[in-house]
Amino acid sequence: MERLPGGLQKALTAGRWLPIIGAGISATAVTDDQRRPPGWKQLGKQLGEDLLGPDDAGPIDALSAYADTFGRPRLVERLSELLLVRDLAPGAVHQSFAKLPFDRVITTNIDFLLERAYEDQRRPYEPLLGESQLALQPSRQATRLLKFHGDLRHPDQLVVTEDDYDGFLRRSPLLATALSWWLLTREPVFFGYSLDDADLREILALLRERLGRMTRPAWAILPADPHDEAARFQRRGIKAIVLDPDPTADRAVVLAEFFTELRTLWEQEIAKKLQIRTDAASAELRRPAVAPQLALFVASRPLLALYREFVFQAVPRRTGLLPLGIDDIRTQDPGMDLMAIDMALSKAAVVVYDSGSGNSLSQSYVASRRPVDPAVVNVLPDLPQLHHPAAGLGPTVTRPTEMGTWGEAFVPELLQSINTARPSVSPPVLPADLENPKGTTQHQDLLLTCLALLEGELRRSLTDDETPGGGPQGNLPTVIPLNADGGRMERLRTFFDADFEAVIRAVRIRHDLVQNLRVDEKEIELAAIALRSMVQQRPHLLT
């Protein structure tokens, strides 16, 4: 990661990367018997051998000659054989790339390894092969995979021969326009790309010609560079970044590790840009996953409105958790939404998944984003004529179709199921980096974590109060407010006693941090250390 310029890292975490995947990525996959598909140049050489033609014929020449000699149907069949389409499964590179929630990806590959990797990761995706699909409204949760040269299941749309390339942009002007717009607004980043694609080069050249100095830079990520490809990219106006200076480094290993590091960086940085309803909920998605405090509800928008009206108010008092709807997850740019949703699903203490109609996230996708212990409550609509597959992820609750009966059985049962699904054991101590924080970032993490634990204690104090407002703690808020009326503030003062001022100071600092306002580093450190002392005096918070 340290080899990426800071501006390119910021473009990633702002959701502005446009990955362009070439044949070099497919070449990293391996069959069970250790066979690999050929790269772009090797593919041309193997087809040339079938033709008994010259060894130095380029890939496009070889593909064109093969189609001219044996016909296009046989070319498609031979490509399927050489690319090992039936035998090849996504490897570590594809799997680690599929964990990156890009909203748009372009590939010139005609195989199906990316699609299978997305399926393995349960990530929603929408393949785009023709101009007519551009008119469809994209799903907020899905990756749009533009297969610029088609694929082997649609041989009439394949772009592999000279005839296919000649006039392709003229025959597909809307596709070229869409791609040009993406390149205008995003940072194109090439992986496994050989620069032999005349169409993409033509579009990039057109943008440079029209925009001049206002052209966004294009980047090529090379895992290693044994053949000095970086210089070739530079000559074509593409900035090359070599990840490993060792020319003999294993390309697949380097790329898989790189994609894993990309995701870690993305998660860390995007948390600062989330736009959530409350400071406490925003902090939950920023801080380390120690004793998580969120109950995340995943349902259609109309159902979430009902959950907010009939369920959310009871969640803090009956479970000690903060309720949050999946539609509350918002970012500064739609390109960051997929990572934000990923983070919310993985960091929540419990996910309540309603399988009613209109839910845009599949249950398998939600489960794939959860930790080893899924902690998912499945809500099934009371429609016996519909078949609901067994989830096997956690407790199941039936939601009555008649709203008048929600308060009698559904809501109490749902709250009990949330308590059942919630992980019961937290780390016995704070992680080492929070016990002995170094630097501003770790002090921020310590402050947010300790404050979340204290607010969790505050919510649990209301759990046993069956008549809110009737006891001395009945009107306590479920999160510590910045401004509260005198009665509530006095109750908070009574609850935290001598620690009250330190807690309120930390709440104000959290607000400024969540709003990305400047806070003095020493002030953060002192507040974090004070909260750590409070938590350590309350060992029950970490058990």
Image (spheres, rainbow, N blue to C red):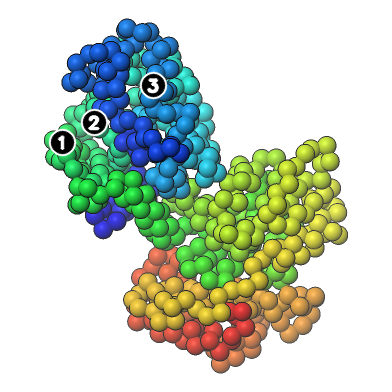
Provide residue 348's location: percent of width, then percent of height.
58, 61
Provide residue 339's location: percent of width, then percent of height.
47, 51
Residue holding disc 3: 79
- Please determine whether, in this image, residue 404 is positioned above or below residue 54: below
In this rendering, would 227 be left or right of 18?
A: left
Q: SS at mark 2?
A: loop
Query: Is tag 2's residue or tag 1's residue first in the polypeptide sequence?
Result: 2
In this rendering, would 133 be left or right of 163?
A: right
> Marks 1/3: CA distance?
28 Å
Visible in this render: residue 460? yes
Query: Is tag 2's residue or tag 3's residue first in the polypeptide sequence?
Result: 3
Viewer-side label of 2, 3? 3
In the rendered view of the protein, which quadrant contains the C terminus? bottom right
**Front residue (pair 378, 472):** 378
Tell me the number on the disc at residue 358.
Answer: none
Q: Residue furthest front?
A: 33
Residue holding disc 2: 195
**For residue 193, which quarter of the picture?**
top left
Query: Is tag 1's residue or tag 3's residue first in the polypeptide sequence?
Result: 3
How many marks on residues? 3
